[in-house]
Image (cartoon, grey):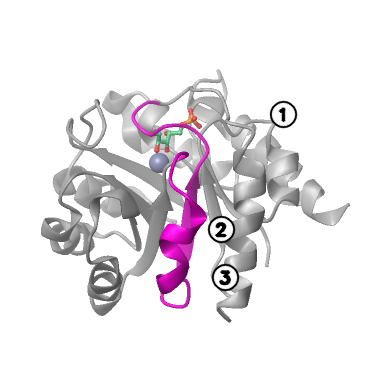
Amino acid sequence: MSVLLAPSILSADFAYLAEAVAAAERGGADLIHVDVMDGHFVPNITIGPPVVKSLKRIAKVPLDVHLMIMDPDKYIGPFAEAGASMISVHVEVLPHLHRTIHAIKALGVKAGVVLNPSTPVVAISEVAADVDYVLVMSVNPGFGGQTFIPRSESKVADVRALLEKAGNIAAPVEVDGGIDIHTVTRIVKAGARMLVAGHAIFGSGDPERATRDLKLAAIAALQD
Ligand code: DX5
Ligand code: ZN
């Protein structure tokens, strides 16, 4: 399994999203990470299906949609229709997580489950065999540019072990929050194979170069 880099457009200039996506793609982005926030589950409000639909028109790589919303079941259909290739949902808001995962898959979209920093890994043990990927939050969701929580490292390793135990070897662990050139090595070594990065890429003066540098560092971490 190689490492996939998913630049998060949350830190891009929303007036120039097409340029942001193109720069990340030139730098080697494997996915584009889209952060959907509702002002309830998290304090911030961002974007909805119409923006995903527009992004789908211009993006060459798949759209990785991260739903930070209170009632994801209501919006899975619209985001799938808008062009999401992957949809991840927070376990903290879903009493019927198994049903939600299979509803996402039934739409032909990859289904991911997300754990907040304070949510224990055991919360997903019963669905570990069902998911296409697991997203470990390495910051509290809501904003870009926050500091990586070091405890996330052992959590990634624990999620990896859970997926192996469940026989779900193909499902990668994704990490989101505070990933930059300094934190990338240890998180890849812990077992992360999909990396979200917002501020490190779009907060830099040169997103194309930042994408390339981060991806090279991730691949190097995999090899030594
Ligand atoms: C945080 C979002 C992240 C965010 C990561 O709530 O889920 O995807 O964009 O941004 P950085 O890389 O700046 O921590
Ligand atoms: Zn995210």
Q: Marks 3 and 2: CB-CB under 8 Å?
A: yes
**Looking at the image, which residue sits at the far top?**
205
Residue 183, visible in the rendered structure: yes
Circle 2 residue: 173
Q: What residue lies at 78% left-to-right and 54% top-to-bottom? A: 222
Mark 3 vs 2, N-terminal side: 3
Q: Distance between the residues labelled 2 and 1?
A: 19 Å
Q: Identify the image quadrant of residue 182.
A: top right
Which residue of the protein is positioned furthest toward the right in this rendering? 224
Between marks 3 and 2 in the image, the one whose residue lies nearer the viewer: 3
Residue 20 on image: x %, y %:
42, 33
Q: Is mark 1 on a helix, strand or loop?
A: loop
Q: Mark 3 points at which residue?
A: 163
Q: Residue at x 15, y 64 (%)?
A: 77
**Hey, what amino acid is under mark 2?**
Val
Mark 3: which amino acid?
Answer: Leu
Q: Which amino acid does label 1 sit on?
A: His
Q: In which quarter of the image is ligand 1?
A: top left
From the viewer's perspective, is residue 203 above or below residue 165?
Answer: above
Q: Residue at x 43, y 63 (%)?
A: 124
Pointer 1 residue: 182
Residue extent of the magenta highlight? 117-143
First of labels 2, 1 by sequence position? 2
In terms of secondary structure, where does tag 2 sit? strand
Q: Position of residue 113 (x, y in %)?
A: 39, 59
User: Is 96 included in the stretch rendered in magenta?
Assistant: no
